[in-house]
Amino acid sequence: MESKASFQQQDHQQNESFRFFELEGDRFDTPFHHHDEIELTLIAEGVGLRLVGDSIAIFKKGDLCLLGGGLPHKFHSIPSGTQPRAYVLQFRRDCCGGVIDDSPELARVAAMLDGANRGLQFGIDAATVTAGKLNSLRSAIDHEIICQFLSILGLLSKTQGAPLSSESYCADRNAERTARMHQAYNYILNNVHHELPQSLVAQQLGMEREAFGKFFQRQANQSYRHFVQTTRLSLASLLLLHTDRGIANIAEAVGFGNQTNFNRCFRSRYHASPRTFRKIGKEVKAERKLEQFLKPVERRKMELHTQLTAIRAGLGL
């Protein structure tokens, strides 16, 4: 039976200003849902698709996004050889006694939370620092908890986050309509390797084809055909970067019966052939690994240089 989803009530203890928890399992397949709390999610392991408002994009290790209260979202992982894991921080805007909107010193944070109504994605550097701060938050006690929490928001407010959903998107908080979209998204994601005519998905929702098309356009802020195409190509990009499967096999796995058509559609979206896209992706991965190796080395060289300068100064050299 298809599970229903819409608004999710988050239970907060009276003695806590926010919730911080870790998600881990064989897969992420959260419902398409919304809640009043603002949510900060950091992907620690795993890959998949992230739906936020009218945006559909891939997520992977290091993905960090901030989602405003009431913004519908869904995470859908795919097998990648590692168990998906994420850190989640949920809070109300008026938490901590309303300090965010009442303090001039936190005006930048308040502005960032306004921007989070569309969803914000932050870069890998911000995600790396945030991961360390979240680990510190785990062991913090008493006032240290609030300090770490505000420190995370302060850090991100100084970072340029990229909007996720479009300016024209307007979230619908109606429970029944959100539940229907959850049902449609689930069916598409779980059957993306098959043909997905609009009439078939409409039938799953008990709707006529034309009525479903108009409903989907209003809710997703895009046509059904565009959404399915974007989903197929996004999954293909993940498989190209995170598996060694052949291109013909990937094309078939995401619902393209014709590899020529797949190559043409992929190039139109990513401005590169699937083969070139995979090659560049591997080169970028290798470059990032090299950067991760070199950063500690360069930092240690700078520390030694500083120490040597201080010793020379002390010796009058």
Image: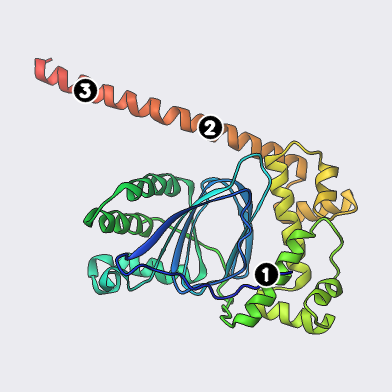
Expressed as whole percent of the image width and height from the top left, the position of residue 237 reads 71, 48
Determine whether 255 is above or below 291 in the image: below
Between 246 and 38, the one nearer to me in the picture: 38
Residue at image mark 3: 307
**On the rendered structure, is 281 left or right of 247?**
left
Dividing the image into 4 quarters, which one contains the C terminus? top left
Residue visible at 39% across and 61% down in the picture: 19
**Which marked residue is nearer to the observer: mark 1 or mark 2?**
1
Q: Given the image, on which type of amino acid does mark 3 rest?
A: Gln
Dividing the image into 4 quarters, which one contains the N terminus? bottom right
Q: Is residue 300 visible?
A: yes
Question: How is colour applied across the structure in the image?
Answer: rainbow
Per the model, the C-alpha gap separating discs 1 and 2 is 41 Å
Determine whether 107 is above or below 20 in the image: below
Q: Which of the 4 image quadrants contains residue 167?
A: bottom right
Between 157 and 76, the one nearer to me in the picture: 76
Residue at image mark 1: 3
Q: Given the image, on which type of amino acid does mark 1 rest?
A: Ser
Residue at image mark 2: 289
Mark 1 vs 3, N-terminal side = 1
Per the model, the C-alpha gap separating discs 1 and 3 is 62 Å
Between 206 and 304, the one nearer to me in the picture: 206
**On the rendered structure, is 124 left or right of 304?**
right
Expressed as whole percent of the image width and height from the top left, the position of residue 4 reads 65, 73
Q: Given the image, on which type of amino acid does mark 2 rest?
A: Lys
